[in-house]
Image (cartoon, helix red, strand yellow):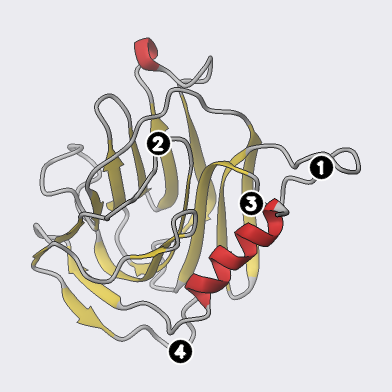
Amino acid sequence: MNIWIVLSLCVMAVSSAEPGPCFEFNGNNSYLEFVPDNFDLSDSAHYKLSFRTEQENGTMLFARGPHDYEAIYVFKGKLNYYLFNPTSFGAGGTFGVHFESNGPVNTNDWFSVEVFRNRRVRRGEARMTGQEPPLMSGLVLTENGVEEEHLREVTLRGVHIQGLVYVGGAGRDLSTTIGEFKGKISNILELKNGMRFEDPSRNSGVTRCFPQRDSA
């Protein structure tokens, strides 16, 4: 079966349902912990979520393995996605990827973001008829229908992320400067596995909220 048909069916299975829940984080030891079943993030991943914040810094999503980790976070007002591989276990010659938004996102407006690694997304067009699109990693930020893209054609090897996925924090200090997220996060998805994050295994001080009508 054509890979685009498979990917389209996976995305439709997730997106055709009602939007996922909205969670509000107070930035003071508030986070969600998820233990996904049959969930594979080792070779590739494709996250999507909407958010609103006024804070300059905050961890939105964090997942890790024995030696690697990845995070979506706000730092100095800008949105970042970072995949880390220590050099002895690094992803080929790249040792991970890092993307940062052009402008600030701590504006109290709703944004939608997709981050992905080792995915054949539609933005990576095949160069020849019948050829598969290249593997891409990137960050795509959307506000009011306007997209900002940060893409790299790169094949990341040696990535091993498994186990728990945290939203809004990580239950521990990851950085002395970034801290936990304060604001709202809604409709949290992982499109590769067709996963919607809605029933956490642990909830530390997070409340349900209603996203605004103009949420991305």
Could you tell me how far apart the alpha carbons at marks 3 and 1 are, in whole angstroms? 18 Å
* Residue, disc 4: 213
Could you tell me how far apart the alpha carbons at marks 2 and 3 are, in whole angstroms? 24 Å
* Residue, disc 3: 149
Q: Earlier in the sequence, mark 3 or mark 1?
A: 1
Q: Earlier in the sequence, mark 3 or mark 4?
A: 3
Q: Farthest residue to the front: give it.
A: 1
Element on which disc 3 rests: strand
- Which amino acid does the dot numbered 2 rest on? Ser
Tell which of 193 and 124 is nearer to you.
193
Could you tell me how far apart the alpha carbons at marks 2 and 4 are, in whole angstroms? 35 Å
* Residue, disc 1: 126
Name the quadrant containing residue 42. Answer: top left
Element on which disc 1 rests: loop
Tell which of 30 and 78 is nearer to you.
30
- The image quadrant where one finds the N terminus is bottom right
- Which amino acid does the dot numbered 1 rest on? Ala
Task: Name above or below for residue 126 compared with residue 6.
Answer: above
* Residue, disc 2: 42
Task: Name above or below for residue 137 compared with residue 103.
Answer: above
| Identity of the residue drawn at 41% across and 37% down | 82
| Identity of the residue drawn at 44% across and 44% down | 81
Could you tell me how far apart the alpha carbons at marks 4 and 1 are, in whole angstroms? 37 Å
- Which amino acid does the dot numbered 3 rest on? Glu
The image position of residue 177, as x and y in percent, is 22, 40
Q: Earlier in the sequence, mark 4 or mark 1?
A: 1
Crowding at mark 3 (Cα within 10 Å: few <14, some 14-19, many 20+) = some
Q: Earlier in the sequence, mark 2 or mark 3?
A: 2
Residue 47 seen by the camera? yes
Could you tell me how far apart the alpha carbons at marks 3 and 4 are, in whole angstroms? 24 Å
